[in-house]
Amino acid sequence: MSHKHEVINRPFSDVHVTGRSVVATLLHDPTVEGLDVALYMDGSASMEPEYGPRGVLAKLGGVRNTVEPQMRWMLEYLASKDRNGVLRVAYWATGDGTQLEQVGDLTGPQGKDYKFPGPKYYGKGTVMLPVLRDFVAYVKQESSTGLKRGLAVVITDSQLHDAADIQAYSGQVAKEIAAGRLPRLNFVLVGVGDKIDEEQMEAICHASYPGVGHLWCHRVADRMEEMADLVAVLVDETMTVAAGGTIYDDRGNVLKVYEGRLPAVLEFEVPVGTQGFALEVAGQRYPQPLPQEDDDHDDEADARLPFVAQVQRAGGHGKHGH
């Protein structure tokens, strides 16, 4: 009789075996699993003309809010990457330049017509360290609810007043990540306009940390209207598996190492008698049992049950029936 046991475990969508050759298709980039995204928009005084007038003056027309449509597009796009579709959104560099004004937790659909008139109190400086502290505290809080990776998008139109503090704090964050006390974090920094200090941004973003690599990436947009497109490009680049991945068999032997970006379709050979394999990406392993080429032998199918059970305990799901 035919006796079939098949489990397709995330992040795989399909696994085929022909002899010793395996072809495994990825459902999605596994590092995006559990991703939490936050968006921090510059609220310093130099941004006031971009937001335009408020209240009665806003209704007179003539001067439009160039930030609002960009914020809406970014919010909708970033929400599609987020694990629960809800973004933490805040204005930063408000008040004396060190404060944050929380806009709220917003979904993509909310973002389509949400009003972004600017902060209540435009800032007198551009101090970014509070953004990093806020995001790290948020990540620690959300780690208990399923957050596995964090991404903060930070927009500014000014020279930063605390670049040295940002670099020092980034080094501390990298050590926490390398030690396993924080999940993997990335920061996307987009500068807008001609008041940006690109050398300063490069110094922050080019820093590489042991066991972590780069935390930051950046681009500069000439105009506010280019901001959302740049953010989308940077986020897509950041969310690829830059460090590649490694395939192991069920005995822990390395079968294949992928340098650079992980392809959507993984092809590799397995030793005779292999019951399953695991893909390791960014320090996390994803086990996957091998479907059998010929499932007519009950004893062979039953021999694979321990590995199937292991995958199911790890959160695998799919078809499993007789």
Image: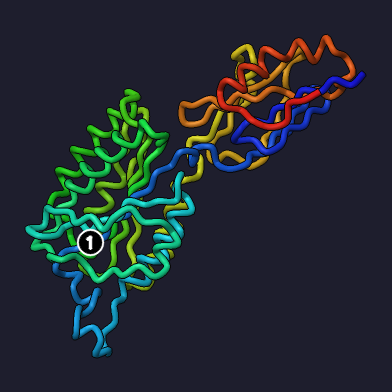
Q: Residues within 10 Å of mark 1 (few under 14, many from 20)?
A: many
Mark 1: secondary structure: strand
Residue type at tag 1: Asp
> Left or right: where does residue 265 sit relative to residue 139?
right
Name which residue lies at 57% across and 27% down: 315
* Place of residue 305 in the rendered image (x, y in percent of width and height, measured from the top left): 71, 14
Q: Residue at x 25, y 48 (%)?
A: 203
Position of residue 197 measured from the top left corner of the image (x, y, whole percent):
21, 60
Q: Quadrant of residue 259?
A: top right
The C terminus: image quadrant: top right
Asked where in the image residue 264 lies, by quadrant, the reply is: top right
Q: Which residue is label 1 attached to?
A: 42
Q: Residue furthest front?
A: 322
Q: Quadrant of the N terminus?
A: top right
Using the image, determine if residue 82 lies above or below residue 222: above
Tell me which residue sits at (85%, 13%) in the image: 298
At horizontal 19% and vertical 44% (from top left) the residue drawn is 166
Height in image: 109 above or below 247?
Answer: below
Vertical relation: 45 (above or below) 243: below
**Residue 235 appears at what percent x and percent y?**
43, 52
Colouring method of the image: rainbow
In this rendered view, identify the residue nearer to me: 320 or 169.
320
Q: Extreme right residue here?
A: 1
